[in-house]
Amino acid sequence: MIVALDLDCFYASVAIRARPHLKDKPVVIVQKHLCVTSNYVARQRAHGAVQKMTPVSKAKAACPDLVLIDGSDLTPFREANQQVVASIREWLAEKIALACTRESTGSFQCPCQKLGFDEVFIDLSRIVQSEMEFGKRPWRFEGHVFGRTDDDDERRLLMIASQLVKELRDRIIADTKLGLCAGISTSKLLAKLAVNMHKPNDQTIFLPSDAARYVGALPPRSLPGFGHATGMKLEDWANRNGRNELKFARDIVQNFGMTSEGLVSLGKILGSKDYARKILALCHGEDDAPVVDSGTAYKSITSMDSFRKCDTMESVRARVNERLDDLVTRLRKDWEVNKRRPRTLTVGYRFKGNGFHGSARAVPMPCEIVSLCSKNGAHVKKAAFSALQTASLRILAEHAGVAASKQFDLTWISIGASNFSKCADLEKEKQDNLTLANFFESRSQVDQDQRAQHRKRKTQEHDNVQVSKTEADTTPCPVCGEVTLGNLREITAHVDLCLRRGAKNKTGKKRRTSANTLRVDSFFSKQ
Ligand code: DCP
Ligand code: MG
């Protein structure tokens, strides 16, 4: 029971939430003279002329009263995303707690995976299962129903899932004042396809029995998980081999079939048999990818930007500095909330003429980041900034050939921090290192102490021997009980002899060996 959530005209909704007077006006969010999204009023008013990535001039021509809002600062969108995820997690926690109480079981998890800023997948299976057993839910779907199912249990489970999702959406809207759509089905692929079927502020249930036919009729590139590069490789292969155009997903299935031979040849084209299997399954409407919980914090923090021209070292430095200003501030904020530090720095770049084809290089984080992400980090931002700047420029020089002596024209840069460690771990690591350092530092002292103790022990032993000797003079042999013994060596030799001889004690009785041994032991322990 997988749910895909997608916020409606996300950037525009966040911007309008902060400016309620714009609620009924056509609004677009602008980044570098392009409309990155628009609210639904603008979409209707401009009859499709303000699609994502439309130049502002064109959008304005189609809808003159368009309100333009600058969207270059992503902070409000990031924060809104966190509010949405917090609301989802709170709702999930309540449902899980209820299920655990009803079932008298230990707690469980319903994974929640973020995808970009405004999409989330949730695996609701476990809660739905509990509701099926204890929930007394009505026998109906909540939302639009697409497709059909031959399985009554599946139908019932999807009904319950749709009712739960309606509750969840209502909760998110109440908590965040942001509208959203949901797709509900039995895989991430079908849930994601369903989410776009009725927009805005609505939900669709995709019953999966006819999924293969439906998906087969879609262009392969519209399938989530079917990347741009995959499309290029397949088109190239089709052209070279005079095959029909691979226009629909079913054409890929027909060309390669679901046989092992087909899999091998597709694997050769795509570079991996596993990936080929995944692509064939996708084109057939099947997807067994699990929802992997993203945790509460971002896996990486990246600042990126694209531009028309960046062909001098001065402009590269300026672009890098802009990214680092943003990154350093966000890393510091992240430390305040999550108490963690990144260990890896990644710099990505694209050159003019390479389209979306870019490269990236990862290196260990400069150690100045440790000071930035610590208690007094707010005061050492400059040091972290300049260490990151040196590292980033070095990567660009060494791996991208971005240097004063060379010709280049960059169109995109990204600088990211990832591979985070909780500071508790780092503190422990530090503590362990300290302990180790202390150990080695104090080792010489320990050695000295031990040597002194050793000397003392030797002296005591010597004294003890003297004492023993004195006591032994008056101690009878534990075996024969009669002989007056001398020093330790003489005692041992005498007792050995007595034991070998099976000597009798004073009373004339021959002692049992075990008893002898006991007596001898206690004798020596006394010594
Ligand atoms: N975005 C962007 N550049 C793009 C596409 C999108 O910066 N080329 C941003 C703006 C969007 C946000 O990402 O608000 C989410 O993208 P969606 O594709 O989900 O679009 P919206 O949420 O805006 O609209 P919809 O209601 O169609 O989901
Ligand atoms: Mg959206």
Image (cartoon, rainbow, N blue to C red):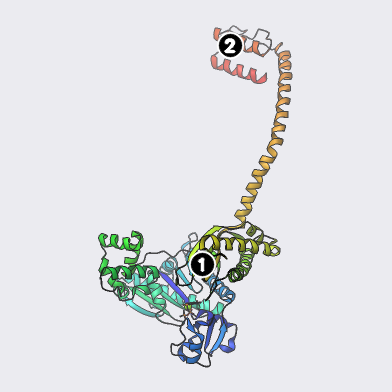
In the rendered image of this protein, does residue 97 appear above or below residue 17?
A: above
Residue sitting nearer the eye, 382 or 52:
382
The disc placed on residue 496 is 2
Residue extending furthest front?
Answer: 405
Kind of residue at disc 2: Asp
Residue 402 is situated, as x and y percent measured from the top left of the image, at 54, 65
Residue sitting nearer the eye, 513 or 58:
58
Q: Is residue 265 visible?
A: yes
The disc placed on residue 349 is 1
What is the crowding at mark 2: few (fewer than 14 residues within 10 Å), some, or many (at least 20)?
some
* Quadrant that contains the C terminus: top right
Q: Is residue 227 visible?
A: no
In the rendered image of this protein, does residue 176 appear above or below residue 376?
A: below
Rendered residue at 64%/53% (across/down): 427
Decide which of tag 1 and tag 2 comes sooner along the chain. 1
Residue 77 is situated, as x and y percent measured from the top left of the image, at 56, 76
The residues tagged by marks 1 and 2 sit, at their Cα atoms, a distance apart of 86 Å
Rendered residue at 36%/66% (across/down): 287
What is the crowding at mark 1: few (fewer than 14 residues within 10 Å), some, or many (at least 20)?
many
**Is ligand 1 closer than 8 angstroms to the Cβ of mark 1?**
no
Kind of residue at disc 1: Tyr
Query: Do labels 1 and 2 touch, CB within 8 Å?
Result: no
* Quadrant that contains the N terminus: bottom left
